[in-house]
Image (tube, rainbow, N blue to C red):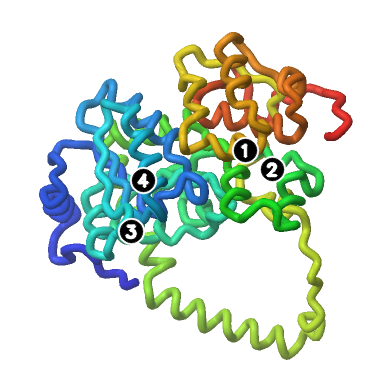
Amino acid sequence: MDARQAYAPELSRRERRARARHALGIPAENFVVAFVGRLSFHSKAHPQPLYRVLAKLAKHTAGITLIECGHAFNEQIIAAYDELQHSFDGLNFIRVGGSKPAGEDEKWEALAAADVFTSPADNLQETFGLSLIEAMAAELPLVVSDWDGYRDLVTPDVSGFLVPTYDVLLTLDGADKLEVLYRLGLVDYDMMIGIRSLGVIVDEEALERSLTILLRDSERRQGMAEASLQKYNDNFSGKVVAEQYRELWGELSKVRESDERSRNLSRFHGSYASIFAHHASTSFEASKIIIDDDGTPPEWLNSAMVRDFLQFLLGGQIPQLICLLESKKSLSIAELHALGIKAPESRMLLAALVKFGIGRLGMGATPDSLSDPINIEDE
């Protein structure tokens, strides 16, 4: 990738935006947020928290558009996205790609049309974030998860915002049931990462604050866009990256020549809790949540985006959980144990309910401050 703009390089940023919006049928005055990446709720980023936030903003600001540019692996995934989008009538959706992968020109056009780039990644599979670098090259401010390599690409409050993430995985000491079953080949990869993502929360309030700031303050938006492009030019343009590779090759050559230990590297792999300990901002350890009367209806747990993964945690008891949620004002780990749901699956389930807006934490509480001492034999 070269430092020159990939889309209409002869035009200014404002002119590129106008051209791209005309091509995509987006009104010039709309606030446009772009997501570029796999359209995958189980292996990239679950879209529901982002939809919820943008729908809240749309209640007070007309003309908010979300562009989702990427590839969905099958028609069932597309149907699941369509089903969820129908729940958010006040939000304008544009899909670029879908069952047919978006082309390079389509991708750069989508980025050119946007005011802000977002990627609320919540999956262990997501690491470096090439799409973030492309958004920087397209001169966009970034609102993304504070997640693994993402946090290395954003200068907080300068080129964008990092949204805190909380992960149940960080509370584990060693391998849990899911990891054991996966390593034995009894759970496939897609199912494993989909279930793991249930335990990762992207801070919805922080996501809303970040997007609200950029929605209301065009000067701040422009300043972040310029800083984003500058960071790209300084760190990720073709010439810079080529020089970094040359330096790396030289360093590795010296290591190979001088360090015999490199020939005897250990093949031991630690548990996922240790391998992925740096991905999220912090842990999620709440042992009780409040059921949100104004949140996502509990019956949403039967939707295509979550049902199969919940079956692993609930052992077929989704109807019982829905009834419990509809009849109570709060839900605790102890009550989940009464349903036969053991730890750490019960903690992951509480995290999923917060993640999808069915439950929330108590007033003034944070995800890593609500853990009460409990006596559970299998914890």
Q: What's the residue type where badge 4 is placed? A: Ile
Q: Name the residue under label 1.
A: 199
**Amino acid under disc 1:** Gly
Counting other residues with Cα less than 10 Å from the Cα at mark 1, is it few (<14), some (14-19), or many (20 or more)? many
Q: In which quarter of the image is the C terminus?
A: top right
First in sequence: mark 2 or mark 4? 4
Residue at mark 3: 229
Tag 1, which secondary structure? loop
Mark 3 neighbour class, 10 Å CA radius: few under 14, some 14 to 19, many 20 or more: many
In the rendered image, is residue 219 in sight? no
Mark 4 residue crowding within 10 angstroms, few (<14) / some (14–19) / many (20+): some
Kindly report the distance in space between the C-alpha atoms of the residues bearing marks 1 and 2: 7 Å
From the top left corner, tell me how far across and down residue 248 is, in percent.
57, 79
Q: Which of 99 and 136 is in front in this view?
A: 99
Tell me the number on the disc at residue 169. 2
Q: Mark 1 or mark 4: name the one nearer the start of the chain.
A: 4
Would residue 193 be found to the left or right of residue 219 on screen? right
Which residue does the image show at 63% across and 49% down from the upper left?
192
302 to 106, vertically: above or below? above
The answer for how far apart the CA atoms under marks 3 and 1 are is 34 Å
Could you tell me if the residues under marks 3 and 1 are in contact, i.e. CB atoms within 8 Å? no
Asked whether the beta carbons under mark 1 and mark 4 sit within 8 Å of each other, the answer is no
Earlier residue among tags 3 and 2: 2
Find out whether the residues at labels 2 and 4 contact each other: C-beta distance under 8 Å: no
| Residue at which label 4 appears | 78
Q: Which of 371 and 300 is in front in this view?
A: 300
Dot 1 and dot 2 residues touching (CB under 8 Å) = yes
In this rendering, does residue 343 appear at all? yes
Numbered disc 3: secondary structure:
helix
Real-space CA distance between mark 2 and mark 4, rounded to the nearest whole angstrom = 29 Å
What separation in Å lies between label 1 and label 4 (alpha carbons)?
A: 23 Å
